[in-house]
Each structure stands twice: as C-alpha cells, then as structure tokens.
Image (cartoon, grey):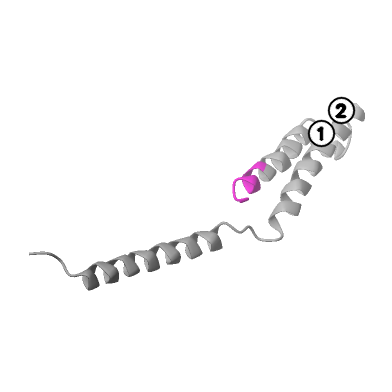
Amino acid sequence: MPKSKVRKKVKEQHHHEQIVEQQEHSNLLKESPAWLAPTMVGAFLTGLIWIVIFYVSNQSYPIPHLGTWNMVVGFGFIGAGFTLATRWH
C-alpha cells in the first residue's frame, strides 16, 4: 500500500528541525570566550621572555634563587599557552 504524502512531509519537517537544532548547538560550542586568545598569547610571550632573560642574564635572572629551574618556569608558561590553544575555536 502506498504511503501518504502527509506523513512523508511531516517526517522531512522533523528531520529538518533536528538538523537546525544541531547546527545552532554546534555554533554555540564553537565560540571561544573573549579572554582566551589574549591569555594564550600572553602565556606564550611570558614564557618566551622568561627564557630569553634567563639566557641573556647568564642564568642569574629573572629569579636568582631558582637557578636553572627558571627554564622550567618559562616552559611552564609556554605549556599553559598550548593548553589554552587546545580550547580555542
């Protein structure tokens, strides 16, 4: 027995509504917070500057008591920047 055209239209309409809802939901998830990009770039630059100061000052600055652990601090800032970069859309 043939299917009625009304059922087919209703089914297509529900399918279209589901697609629109999914697109709206995915668009909301793709937006990054406004603070994310500046914080990410700031973490990258802070880590880079920290390491450059460490090498230029002959390993005595930015914090003299840390010694070579200043490298870990600099790479920690860079790692935080990469962690934030994974959340950026």
Looking at the picture, tell me which residue is in the foreground, 16 or 50: 16
Give the image location of residue 17, x and y in percent. 39, 68
Residue visible at 69% across and 55% down?
36
Residue at the right extreme, as displayed: 57
Answer whether residue 14 is magenta in the image.
no
Mark 1 neighbour class, 10 Å CA radius: few under 14, some 14 to 19, many 20 or more: many
* Residue 46 against residue 21 in the figure, above or below: above
Please tell me the numbered disc located at residue 55: 2
Tag 2 near tag 1, CB within 8 Å: yes
Give the image location of residue 57, x and y in percent. 92, 30
| Left or right of 74, for residue 15 | left
In three-dimensional space, the C-alpha distance between marks 2 and 1, rounded to whole angstroms, equals 6 Å
Looking at the picture, tell me which residue is in the foreground, 54 or 12: 12
Residue visible at 87% across and 37% down?
64
Q: Picture quarter containing residue 14? A: bottom left
Answer whether residue 83 is magenta in the image.
yes
Amino acid type at mark 1: Ile
Give the image location of residue 42, x and y in percent. 78, 48
Please tell me the numbered disc located at residue 51: 1
Residue visible at 88% across and 34% down?
53
Magenta region: which residues? Answer: 82-89
Q: Quadrant of the N terminus?
A: bottom left
Give the image location of residue 52, x and y in percent. 86, 32
